[in-house]
Structure formats: structure tokens, C-alpha cells
Image: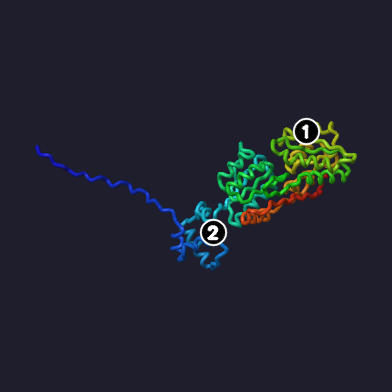
Amino acid sequence: MPYVMVHIPKPPSAASPVQRSVPTSADVARLAGVSRATVSYVLNNTSAVRISEPTRRRVHEAAKELGYVPHAAARSLRAGHSRMVLMPAPAIPMGPLYGQFITDLQWALSRLDYTVVQYGTAGLRGDEAARAWAELRPVAVLVPGAELGPDGVAVLKRAGARAVVTFGPERVEGAHALLMDHDAVGHCAGSHLYARGHRRIGVIVPEGAGLETYSRPRLEGVRQALRGTDAEVTGLPLGYTEQSAAELATRWPELGLDAVFAYNDEYAMLFMRALQDAGVRIPEDTAVLGADDLMLGRLLRPRLSTIHIDLPSGRELAELVDRVVRDPGCEPEMRRVLGASVVQRESS
């Protein structure tokens, strides 16, 4: 029986998606009608070469149309260093004042063509943290608080960090330092309450771990201001909860205090509400003073007296970083910052 072979055509397969190639600087140059060098000068904000504004605009428009983004690693190789500024994320709660400072700093650094990266520090401290930061090869590291020692500074510099800047209560050998004098905040508060006639002054100290770096100097500053006077100072541990505040307010009459300086405005507002709920009149029975001069304090009734704190501007710190990156061999600078002044309102 003869066999007949029949060819059954294979159905066409679904068209595979076309893989789009990653746009390059050469693509941008062709679309903009300029050289690759011009693209590099424009997108890297090179100031050494003068390029007309229309040309800059064409390059930026071409890069946007193609979706081109400069390769950070390649740019770092050409420059001999990265443009990454690393900031370890604080391991302790930071208030709105510090948050605004960080936002201003990041904006100022971006204007100078740096990329700011926040690094989570959970479980890492000291030199171990410094080695983790060094793996990213940042050109600068800005370290808040007391999280870094001289060995950690040396690790970062060996890994290519040109600028290591700490901002906290103490200087670290080998690093540029912005010294934040929290004693002055407490001294200012103690002097104000004493001048207002208060002699039995409580100072709220947060129970949260990590904040003692800032709260202890503020308590000591109050004690320094009142040393040798007839005033008494009592430290008052307080958790940042309504229950903790209510428990302290319930004991308030037996403590016999006529004024309280809280670690910051947030603790002051928390405790002031608890005092009022307990029937304590402010300021007639007890004066209340905060710190940070937050907007919310002005909306309370009575309005919250506070210590206004002057942090360094983000622009000034960004300029310091940029200057040190350009001249990494310069001697470490030390600046004392954190000015403090009383803003008297109704609560004191």
C-alpha cells in the first residue's frame, strides 16, 4: 500500500519581544548632533569646558528622549573616585528638626553633582559598620552621633573616602568634625527657668536607648547653669508613650517640682498634655520648656516655650564636603555648631 507523505506546516510561533538595547552616550551624541565628548561634558556638569546653552539643551533633550542615564561606575573610573556620599541612617529616632537638616543637606549635595545614599545601620556599630560602608567605595561619609572611631576613619580613607565628617558631641581623630554642643542647650534652659523664679526644676530624660548621647549633656547643662544657686535639679526618665507620661504626671504633686525642661518639644508636648489631664495648671503650677522650636508647639494652649536650636546649614556642610573631596590632604577641620536661644511663650 503506497504511503503518501504530507508536510504539515508548523504554526508560526508568537513573536518574541524585541530586546531594546541599552542607550549609550554615542546614541545621545548622534541624536543631538554633537560629539561623545560634548555629551560627557554636559551630563557630567564639567565646568572646565565652555558649552553653549542651546547645545546643553539639545544634549539633555536627546538623553531624555532615549532614556539615557550615565553609568556611575564608568564615571567613577574616569574621575578616579565615585560621587557617592554615604550617610549611615541613624539607629535612634530623630525628630523633625534633624529631618529637615538632612533634607537640606541632600539637596545641597545633589546641586554639587553628588549622589547621597543612606545606609541602614541595624546590627552594625563602630569599625564593623565602617568596613560595611567602605565596601560601597563612597567618596565621602557623613556620620551622625558617636558611631565611628579613629580606626573606622582609617578604614574608610584606605577604601578611597576623601572626606569623613562626623557631627556629634565629640571629635574623632582623622575626621572633620561638626561639634554639637548639647550642654549649651541645657545651660540655656536652666538659666531661663531660674530667671523666671523657678527653683525646683525637673529635666525629662528619654528612656529610649541611644538618645543618652544627646540627653545627658542637656541634663548636665542645666546642672552647670544652676550650680552654686539655691535651685535643685531632678532627672526624670520618661518613655515616649501616653501611659508613661500619665504615670509621671500622677506622681507630680509628691515630687514638689515647679518647672520641667523636656528633652525636646515632642516630649514636652506629650508631658504637658498629661499634666493638664492630671489637673496641673501650666504655667501657674508648673512651667514647661521644650527644645527644637517646632511649629506644633506654637499651636498648643498655652503655647510652648522652647529652646531654638541653630543647626549648620545643609549648604555649608555640602560645601565643606566638596572642598575636602577636591583637596583630600587638607587638615581636618573642627567647627562648633548648635547655637541655642530661648523662645519664651506662655508655658513658662
State if disc 2 and disc 1 touch (CB < 8 Å): no
Q: How is the image coloured?
A: rainbow
Q: Is residue 55 left or right of residue 229?
A: left
Tag shown at residue 120: none
Q: Is residue 347 visible?
A: no
Identify the amino acid type marked 1.
Leu
- Position in image of residue 96 (x %, y %): 68, 46
Tag shown at residue 248: 1
Q: Nearer the viewer, residue 243 or 61?
A: 61
Question: Which residue shows up at 53% across the image and 53% down it?
Answer: 76
- Report crowding for label 1: few under 14, some 14 to 19, many 20 or more residues within 10 A (C-alpha): some
Identify the amino acid type marked 2.
Asn
- Position in image of residue 24 (x %, y %): 45, 57
Q: Is residue 134 visible?
A: yes
- Position in image of residue 216 (x %, y %): 76, 39
Q: Nearer the viewer, residue 77 or 49?
A: 77
- Position in image of residue 243 (x %, y %): 72, 33
Residue 74 sits above or below residue 187 on the image: below
Residue denoted by label 2: 44
